[in-house]
Every structure is written in structure tokens, then in C-alpha cells.
Amino acid sequence: MIEISKKIISMFGRANAYFGLIKENDRILVGLSGGKDSLLLSTLLARHKKHAPYAFEFKAVTVDYGIGEDFSYLQDYCAQNEIPHEVYRTDIMAIMQEKRRGSSSFCSFCSRMRRGALYSKALEGGFNKLALGHHLDDAVESFFMNFSYNGALRSMPPLYRASNGIVVIRPLIWLRERQMIDFVAYNNLQTPLCNCPAIHDKPPHVREATKIMLQKLEEQNKELFVSLKAAFMNLHAQTFMDKNFLDCPSDRTIGIPSDFPIERMYNEEIV
């Protein structure tokens, strides 16, 4: 019998209620890779379906990249835990090897193709929402990577509508990664070994460096993620330099010409 801690159940339920992620008559597709995050998400949705005061449907889909993975464990796990499941066969690996530019990483290319496959499956099956297993650590890492390397204040929203009309939801957005690790360890769950060629090609060095930086910061400030979670819900956009949010009288103009090469401000040293 799979056990989920009361704290995980509580945080999942509170985030769902706060953001209105799952509603009456929703049809939700879940991306189930077999990793700790998607395993927990699928298991929580199966539990929520039994206890929620409203009806909704969900189905877990595992994208087969065409690299000879064995999904029998996942299929057994889903059958035992009342998780509707399907393996979606694709040629993503062959396409990546043919189309990927030499300067780009497998990770970014694969991520886009995997998301595209899930969107296709959702539209084909009449699902109105796609649930992904991103958690608070993912959101914080994404923020610092964009902040440090892309010159943008950007993170991962708990929900958004894609251009194809599918609403993407992240029900684990208030949970920490270590809670997923504990869930897998406590229940002695198998998680698949990754056969992705990125392990031998271009590991995601930026994300790993960001993880290490955040680990060091959290050692110095135990409340770091508590504060960051609160900050993500308490934005003051008008206190930055984006002229779209500046709080000023309408009869004033902002002295930046429309053709000013603002990207140079990020690349050049300010003295």
C-alpha cells in the first residue's frame, strides 16, 4: 500500500484550492516519466479523485522516446494504484539525432519535443488540462537561471494557457524536491535509470550550478525557500525598470527612445 505523508497531501490540496487547478468535469492528462516527481503527482491525483467533492477524469501518459526503455514497472505501478496509463510511442530520439543543431543541448531540444508530444496526446484525447510535476525547487531554480543568465525575472507559474488552448497546471508547485525523494524512499519505489544521451553529451551544467548555489544559500538561511515562495506571491513589478509597469502620471514620458538598444545594458558594464 502506497503511503503519502499528511504534509504532502495538505500542501497539494492547499495549492490546488488556492490556484483553482482542478475543477469540476476537468479532463487532465498527466506527463508520467516514472521519475519521483511524476510518480508522486500521478499517485496524488488518483487519491484526489477518490476524495474530491467534485468529479474529474485524469490519465497518465508516458512518452516513449524510441530508445528501448522498459515501462513494465510503470505499467504495473499504475495498475496497482488505479492510475489510468498509456505508453505513447514516438520517434523523438531519431528526430533529435537528425534535426538537433550541434550547438544546442539534447535537454532543451528533447524538452520541447516531449511537451509537443504531450500536447498532441491531450488534444487528440479531448483533455482540457496538462499536469506537470514541477515543484518549488524547479520554480526557484528557473527564476535564478533566468535572472543570472537570461536577464529576465521569470519563473514557473502554477497554471497558464498554452497557445493551443490547453491549460498547463503544476499541482506540486508548493512542494519541495526533498519531499518527493522521501516519498520514493519511504515506499521503496523504483525509478528508471535515464538512457538519455545528454548524460554523455551536454549535461545541464547551468541547472546543476544553480542547484549547488541554492544549497549553499539555504545552508546560510534555513528559511530561504519559505521566503522565496512568499516573494513569488508578492510581486511589486512597478519597483523595477520595466516601463510597462512604472507607476507614474500619464502626462510624463520615460526618456528612453523607442530604438534604444536596451539589450546592450545587460551586456555592457555600467560604471
Image: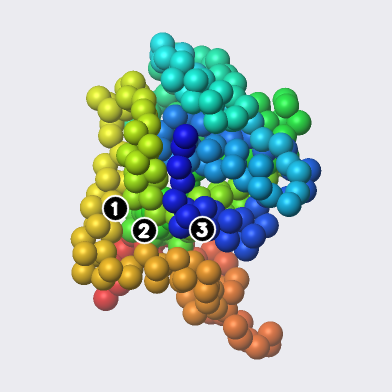
Residue at the disc numbered 2 = 144
Residue at the disc numbered 3 = 11
Badge 2 density bin: few <14, some 14–19, many ≥20, Cα 10 Å: many
Tell which residue pokes out farthest to the right in this image: 25
For label 3, the SS is helix
Q: Residue at x 62, y 63 (%)?
A: 18
Q: Nearer the viewer, mark 3 or mark 2?
A: 3
Q: Is residue 151 left or right of residue 87?
A: left
The mark found on residue 210 in the picture is 1
**261, above or below 119, in the image:** below
Q: Residue at x 36, y 58 (%)?
A: 144
- Mark 1 and mark 3: Cα distance apart in space: 25 Å
Instruction: Please say whether residue 146 is visible from this viewpoint.
Output: no
Amino acid type, mark 2: Phe
Q: Is residue 84 left or right of residue 140?
A: right
In the rendered image, residue 111, in percent from the top left (x then y), is placed at 47, 33
Query: Reading the chain from its start, which is encountered first: label 3 or label 2?
Result: 3
In the rendered image, residue 166, in percent from the top left (x then y), is placed at 69, 41
Q: Is residue 75 left or right of residue 226?
A: right
The mark found on residue 57 in the picture is none
**57, above or below 142, in the image:** above
Tell which residue pokes out farthest to the front in this image: 1
Q: Nearer the viewer, residue 38 or 229?
A: 38
For label 2, the SS is helix
Q: Residue at x 38, y 37 (%)?
A: 187
Q: Are marks 2 and 1 in contact (CB under 8 Å)?
A: yes
Query: Reading the chain from its start, which is encountered first: label 2 or label 1?
Result: 2
Q: Nearer the viewer, residue 245 or 25?
A: 25
- Mark 3 and mark 2: Cα distance apart in space: 23 Å
